[in-house]
Image (cartoon, grey):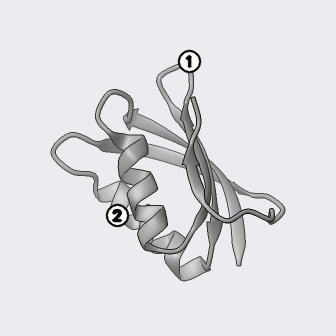
């Protein structure tokens, strides 16, 4: 089990990115949170198995007709006790 703080850059605001990530996190049994930043990027904390996190990041990097992740930076952080993945405003 790992937890990462991740910042995404690209076309990630105004395209349903947060909801898409939340759906992927729930599907892959991950917890954490996601929110928009004022600079147009999106920040997230994601916790789960390494395989599930890698899978989610691969899906996000592929994007879709709306979402485009140009780059992301991740940093491992301590695990937290939580039971869901939320969108923060």
- Residue farthest toward the right in the current orientation of the protein: 78
Identify the residue position indicated by label 2 in the image.
59
- Relative to 15, is 25 above or below? below
Residue 64 percent coordinates (x, y): 21, 50
Residue 52 percent coordinates (x, y): 51, 76
Answer with left or right where residue 19 lies relative to residue 5. Answer: left
* Residues marked 1 and 2 touching at CB (< 8 Å): no
First-in-chain label (1 vs 2): 1
Identify the residue position indicated by label 1 in the image.
38
Local crowd size for mark 1, using a 10 Å CA cut-off: few (<14), some (14–19), many (≥20): few
- Relative to 13, is 45 above or below? below
Residue 19 percent coordinates (x, y): 39, 46
SS for tag 2?
helix
Give me the C-alpha separation between circle 1 and circle 2.
24 Å
Local crowd size for mark 2, using a 10 Å CA cut-off: few (<14), some (14–19), many (≥20): few
- Relative to 58, is 37 above or below? above
Q: In the rendered image, which quarter is residue 79 located in? A: bottom right
SS for tag 1?
loop
**Residue drawn 45% across the image and 54% down it:** 22
Image quarter where the N terminus lies is bottom right
């Amino acid at each position: 089990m790992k937890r990462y703080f991740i910042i995404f850059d690209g076309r990630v605001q105004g395209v349903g990115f947060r909801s898409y990530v939340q759906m992927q996190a729930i599907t892959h049994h991950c917890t954490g949170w996601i929110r928009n930043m004022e600079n147009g990027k999106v920040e997230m904390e994601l916790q789960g198995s390494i395989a599930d996190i890698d899978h989610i990041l691969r899906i996000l990097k592929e994007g879709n007709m709306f979402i485009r992740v140009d780059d992301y930076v991740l940093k491992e952080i301590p695990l937290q006790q939580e039971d869901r993945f939320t969108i923060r405003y």
